[in-house]
Amino acid sequence: MKALVYHGPGKKAWEEKPKPVITEPTDAIVKIFKTTICGTDLHIMKGDLPAVSDGRIIGHEGVGIIDEAGTAVSNFKKGDHVLISCITSCGKCEYCKKAMYSHCEKGGWILGNMIDGTQAEYVRIPYADNSLYPIPAGADEEALVMLSDILPTGFECGVLNGQVKPGDTIAIVGAGPIGLAALLTAQFFSPAEIIMIDQDDNRLHVAKTFGATQIINSSEKGSVEKIMKLTKNKGVDVAIEAVGVPATFELCQEIIGAGGHIANIGVHGKSVTLHLENLWSKNITITTRLVDTVSTPMLFKNVQSGNLDPNKLITHHFTLDQVIEAYETFGNAANEKALKVILTNG
Amino acid sequence: MKALVYHGPGKKAWEEKPKPVITEPTDAIVKIFKTTICGTDLHIMKGDLPAVSDGRIIGHEGVGIIDEAGTAVSNFKKGDHVLISCITSCGKCEYCKKAMYSHCEKGGWILGNMIDGTQAEYVRIPYADNSLYPIPAGADEEALVMLSDILPTGFECGVLNGQVKPGDTIAIVGAGPIGLAALLTAQFFSPAEIIMIDQDDNRLHVAKTFGATQIINSSEKGSVEKIMKLTKNKGVDVAIEAVGVPATFELCQEIIGAGGHIANIGVHGKSVTLHLENLWSKNITITTRLVDTVSTPMLFKNVQSGNLDPNKLITHHFTLDQVIEAYETFGNAANEKALKVILTNG
Amino acid sequence: MKALVYHGPGKKAWEEKPKPVITEPTDAIVKIFKTTICGTDLHIMKGDLPAVSDGRIIGHEGVGIIDEAGTAVSNFKKGDHVLISCITSCGKCEYCKKAMYSHCEKGGWILGNMIDGTQAEYVRIPYADNSLYPIPAGADEEALVMLSDILPTGFECGVLNGQVKPGDTIAIVGAGPIGLAALLTAQFFSPAEIIMIDQDDNRLHVAKTFGATQIINSSEKGSVEKIMKLTKNKGVDVAIEAVGVPATFELCQEIIGAGGHIANIGVHGKSVTLHLENLWSKNITITTRLVDTVSTPMLFKNVQSGNLDPNKLITHHFTLDQVIEAYETFGNAANEKALKVILTNG
Amino acid sequence: MKALVYHGPGKKAWEEKPKPVITEPTDAIVKIFKTTICGTDLHIMKGDLPAVSDGRIIGHEGVGIIDEAGTAVSNFKKGDHVLISCITSCGKCEYCKKAMYSHCEKGGWILGNMIDGTQAEYVRIPYADNSLYPIPAGADEEALVMLSDILPTGFECGVLNGQVKPGDTIAIVGAGPIGLAALLTAQFFSPAEIIMIDQDDNRLHVAKTFGATQIINSSEKGSVEKIMKLTKNKGVDVAIEAVGVPATFELCQEIIGAGGHIANIGVHGKSVTLHLENLWSKNITITTRLVDTVSTPMLFKNVQSGNLDPNKLITHHFTLDQVIEAYETFGNAANEKALKVILTNG
């Protein structure tokens, strides 16, 4: 089969690889129908994740069709249409039993990282019963690709951890795909105000069409003052960090109100300064989280019911064998006005 | 001043009464601007609440203007526009400190019940700082009348107690004003399906325009079967009882799924049968609640932001001195297609 | 092997049966070391559970040693000491993913009910990885038999569902083994007062030594008055029903305070009267639950740390082949002053 | 009357001051019976809190007797014995209604800070109904002094915010009075292991007698390794920071397990480093809090029931006029083996 293979920092190729086979009775082989590229994949390609070895097939999102199911797989059979979770869950370790699949002792985020991933014609999915979700006939399969990672990440790490409530004033720092996923799913809880903050006017404009009630370009002076004014100097109830650099985490600390929640989604490469000299008495809560994808079934229901339209996040389409070109577009997102790209197999 | 006075079962009059005066330093006198009639007021008029004495001014909802504030009132001053809560809260008893204002040792639901109420030109509000809410300039005051009772009741007793969550399938039994208030506010939490059940096709039609995804006329055969089919025989996640008779509570028990919540809003006059022989092992939760109006500030924010439009509940308008006529319309709600009526003073 | 077999109402025998074999790759065969008898087993023997068929081996509690593990079992291997949960969990259905193992689509309470159970020399345990717990060397294995059913039941259905909090005044109605299990585990949350209610003075005496702060014999007049006096007429914060008949559920309704929780543990054979005419405005919560055994790992830790001593519940010892005699003792619990009996194999 | 007065950094005097008088109808004047000294008072005396002005009477803890009650005070009358909360709550602002009294718009921590405090013969308490608690006849009033600040602080900021659960392994960093208050109240939730960490062997010894299951002297090498070994390299479920310096907050980050809670109690004078480069994917929660004293009524109940013995924290006794000497002892706590000192008036 053909797959996108990582060959060390800066090197990748669309090349022939052996079709995966079942190695455990709990495995399934999925024929990829549609997949996408994650911001994390760009980091891998740059060499930022040294644990990813030369020869690894990249990608941890997608939908497909069961090609073969192991003898211990009971939820799926050949021919079933499935959604692939970016998180592999064994369903029987201490963490899985606590619904913290991200820290599964045998799984977690391993796809396209420790084991071969989804930017390929076929992929092996360990613990298939707990790591795949059935897609009923007639569903919009392309839209569901957004449920592999980006929507549960925005929702669980940002919205759920931030404890967004009806009537809240929330701020989302970062209007990239992940911040926009938080924006879309924050609306499940009907906050009164959603302030979107970014340095890119185009993304802020998109945010407005996705439901932001206020937009702030943080490259301009006085962003903090504007936000404080909007909140009558009380600060926001929830600040969602969706970038992953010290400056944006700093901003969250500056605008958080007493009793508020700072929910970190960003993948941080270095430490940040925590201003406990100010915050020790402000009754705030700070959370971090690697997505558990426990909300996938709920997101699925809300897509089916029309409460959530994942297609809003999809801006570009390619065939799977155009994956190198797709990486170029996605890697140049600001100029290309790209959010998520879809790669279709065959 | 003029007021609507209860004179025993079946007797009421719009008549002259002394203007109320401040009796405690925590009191305020409010000049009524707009008020409304509650289903409970109809019960009072029939004599169903024997604790209500002859001579009592009825009504527990409304907006107005502070006419005079007691010396210990600090949140309000003469001329302030205010929303009146149906629940009086002293702010300093054991129950108020637990945010269970409904059971306030000195308050609770006393307005238009144990003390004179709001269907009058003026009303005395005890513990004004904790029982009134400020209305900012420019707000839609008529819409806010719906925040005195009906919307917090639907939300707190039905939606919050029912723990409605994104993706849930919920059923609301009863499409009268209170069931519709639950319907409007349930959408704060983005359930996937909202099944509305009533015996009146007109009300079900209204429910559809308010956001119900399914409507069931329970006077037709097979209602339970239809609901079970809609839920793939799992039953609903949340059943909200908004009528108050044994048959509707029975229905909730028949359609509730394992792990589900039955949230009772209805004012029941007699006991019901609880089928513990079936339910003991179904992991269900049943709740009752007299509204605490703790959600009023949040509802206020969501009205201001446009997340909630209370005007949908208002079908008829009268002047305050037409209150007898308004009672006739509201008391004949099905024929009049009446939901809530507004009475405007002057 | 030898096993206790049900042969229709009133008939049971300790007789030869085929040793169980692995039928699914997720199965394990456990050699029973110690087991016990549950009140539910007495009901089965009387014929109260018609779904239990003639020929069924009874019992759903116990500890043992893995005799053989299926090819898909990864948490256990031959020779491991294990605790058997009364609830079988597949770990991969909708309910298991919500930690509601009691309603597992392929499991739930099936042991000694729909499939052969633990009052035998060997037992087949389906979905072994999710339905067994490892016992480390040196643990008090006899004590752990109490973690198969009775302690998680008292804790989950009574204490957790009742939301017992520090400082609460709680009442437990029924001082049998299950009520006493609730009593022991309620103390995890440090309620200020624990009122134990029963008709048997001996059991009440035992309750006192287990940590009850007040005991009430409900066969005497004025029980409700006594409890109301103890609570300054406010009623209790939590009432735990641990009997399963209408009279005890009625008592819970009479003593529950505003805002309180009634947690039903009892297995009810008929419906009860729910006094919504009084309770509709009392802001109460009523829960039912079949134990999920999600708390087993926590209970295990608290046994190891000394926070919980399950041996207090064990009053009698037999060898497994004395099981008929053990049933007689346990079936005559009041006279025998029996709580839980231990049956040791070999 | 006599009072302890702050006269700028390093200067204090026990001197004559005017007896306070009622200035608002919601005030009460309390005659102090017993008071104590807080670590924060030492900071004030050093000049660390520049907002405290020359001439201020210090102290925010104590019990006493109502000497006079304002006209709007309804919960108390002259002669009532009362517990003084360190936090003043108006009961009617946005924050008080959310039970976040620490941020009361008119109160919060003002006693012995922005207004005169309790190390005096009399003190004026604003919003007396919401800032005092009744003491019934026969209660151990000296013990209750520990409920003014230290016990609710340890409980709310450490234990509640840390979400200590039965079976948890928790670490408390700092075995001073506040860490010991967290230790005592953490046991309300029956954690399996409580690891106490400090650099003072005497305090660690005390911690052991208060219920710590493990003690670690962090001045010795390998503390982190020891803790990780105790937790089988998983880290702790809850880490409570009870010191307030960067090194102890750092330690909490090193030992926290995936999914764990870091609850900060310490008053920090400078910022700390937050290692998001490690923690972003660890699903942790960090909280800060100024005590709200919402738990005071519960703590009171658990003192009455014997679940909590505050006397354990009291090591030294003085008369109120020996307050200067008491400060010396308390300021030299390590050598004096002092925890809390009691100052008795008359």
Image (cartoon, coloured by chain):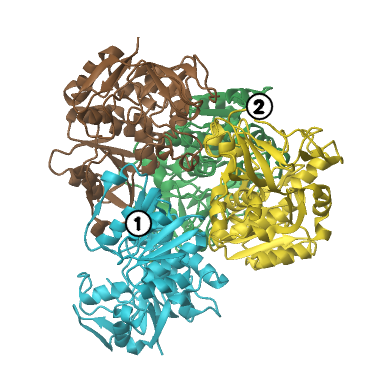
Chain colours: A brown, B green, C yellow, D cyan
Q: Which of the pair B48/A264 is nearer the observer?
A: A264
Question: Outermost residue toward the left?
Answer: A221
Look at label 1 and name its amino acid. Glu
In the image, is residue D87 above or below residue C296?
A: below
Q: Are marks 2 and 1 on the same chain?
A: no
Image coordinates for residue D199, horizontal then vertical, percent:
32, 69
Q: Quadrant of residue B248?
A: top right
The front one of B337 and C200 is: C200
Q: Quadrant of residue D44?
A: bottom left
Left or right relative to A91: residue A340 = left
Q: Which residue is mark 1?
A: D225
Q: Give the answer, above or below, for where C122 lies relative to D241.
A: above
Relative side of D290 to C22, left or right: left
Three-letter amino acid code at disc 2? Val
Question: Quarter of the image containing the N terminus of chain C?
Answer: top right
* On screen, residue B179 above or below B289: above
Circle 2: element type: helix
Circle 1 crowding by C-alpha within 10 Å: few under 14, some 14–19, many from 20 = few
Residue marked by disc 2: B224
x and y percentages locating residue B59 in the rendered image: 53, 48
